[in-house]
Image (cartoon, grey):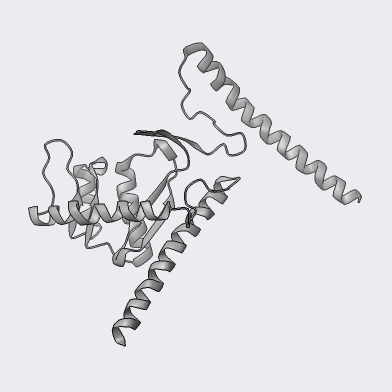
């Protein structure tokens, strides 16, 4: 009984110390808002999960979302892989563009033949780095008046197929059946677990559908 009471006391003490540390950061942010009318950078929005942040989307009915930011790769056969982006809302698309390629190469020990990404990741440096990593067709959409780094025919394939299919996969894992959106998580680590579980569920269902197609074709 004494040990149980000691554990409860230690847990309460740790939580009090954690909240004190959070408030040491939060109170100056509150004062900054009261003094200036502007939200402080990296504003704490959740006392329990201080790592979550606001993500400005600028969409009708969804101007801002709250949570953690994910990177999603669509790989061969329509499967997906995902990872939490360190740095969250302050992580640039240019950095993610290369991180996505690095993740693919670590997983499969080879770069993708075709790599498509939107104009947020465009830069001459990124195009050179992608080619150096072994990508044959670097389909990063050009920004401004820049030209595609691939042929017109390949650019059309990437614009009409590759990017649309990525968006379709992202939309699918956000369906309630997978639970990627608004997980019932109490920590950033739990949010990562829920996200990977949703991605695993998506890939598993797709694998089973492909197996069924092969069995039906064989009969």
In the image shown, does 103 or 195 lie closer to the viewer?
195
Q: Residue, x 26% and y 40% (percent of image)?
A: 120
In the image shown, does 169 or 153 lie closer to the viewer?
169
- Please tell me in which quadrant of the rendered image residue 114 appears: bottom left
Which quadrant of the figure contains the C terminus?
Answer: bottom left
Task: Please state if 9 lies on the left or on the right of 69 as rendered.
Answer: right
Q: Residue furthest left?
A: 152
Q: Residue furthest right?
A: 1
For the image shown, how many numbered marks are present on the structure? 0
Q: Residue, x 87% and y 46% (percent of image)?
A: 5
Task: Please state if 208 lies on the left or on the right of 188 as rendered.
Answer: left
Q: Residue, x 32% and y 80% (percent of image)?
A: 214
Task: Please state if 100 lies on the left or on the right of 185 as rendered.
Answer: left
Residue 138, image x and y in percent?
19, 54
In the image shown, does 111 or 216 lie closer to the viewer?
216
Q: Is residue 78 above or below residue 54?
A: below
Residue 210, image x and y in percent?
35, 73
Q: Is residue 149 above or below residue 27?
A: below
Task: Please state if 16 lies on the left or on the right of 130 as rendered.
Answer: right
Q: Residue furthest bottom?
A: 219
In the image shown, does 26 or 201 lie closer to the viewer?
201
Residue 67, image x and y in percent?
49, 40
Q: Residue, x 81% and y 44% (percent of image)?
A: 8
Residue 81, image x and y in percent?
39, 59
Q: Is residue 48 above or below residue 156?
A: above
């Amino acid at each position: 009984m004494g040990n149980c009471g000691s554990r409860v006391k230690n847990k309460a003490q740790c939580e009090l110390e954690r909240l004190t540390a959070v408030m040491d950061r939060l109170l100056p942010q509150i004062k900054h808002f009261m003094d200036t009318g502007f939200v402080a950078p990296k504003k704490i929005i959740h006392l329990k999960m201080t790592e979550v942040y606001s993500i400005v989307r600028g969409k009708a009915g969804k101007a801002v979302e709250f949570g953690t930011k994910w990177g999603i790769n669509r790989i061969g056969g329509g499967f997906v892989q995902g990872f939490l982006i360190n740095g969250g809302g302050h992580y640039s698309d240019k950095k993610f563009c290369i991180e996505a390629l690095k993740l693919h190469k670590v997983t499969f020990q080879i770069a993708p033949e075709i790599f498509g990404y939107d104009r947020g990741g465009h830069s001459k440096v990124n195009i050179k780095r992608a080619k150096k990593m072994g990508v044959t067709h670097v389909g990063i959409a050009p920004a401004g008046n820049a030209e595609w780094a691939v042929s017109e025919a390949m650019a059309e394939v990437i614009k009409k197929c590759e990017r649309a299919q990525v968006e379709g996969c992202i939309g699918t894992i956000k369906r309630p059946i997978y639970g990627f959106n608004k997980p019932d998580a109490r920590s950033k680590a739990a949010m990562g677990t829920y996200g990977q579980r949703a991605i695993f569920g998506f890939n598993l269902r797709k694998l089973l559908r492909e197996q069924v197609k092969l069995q039906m074709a064989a009969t």
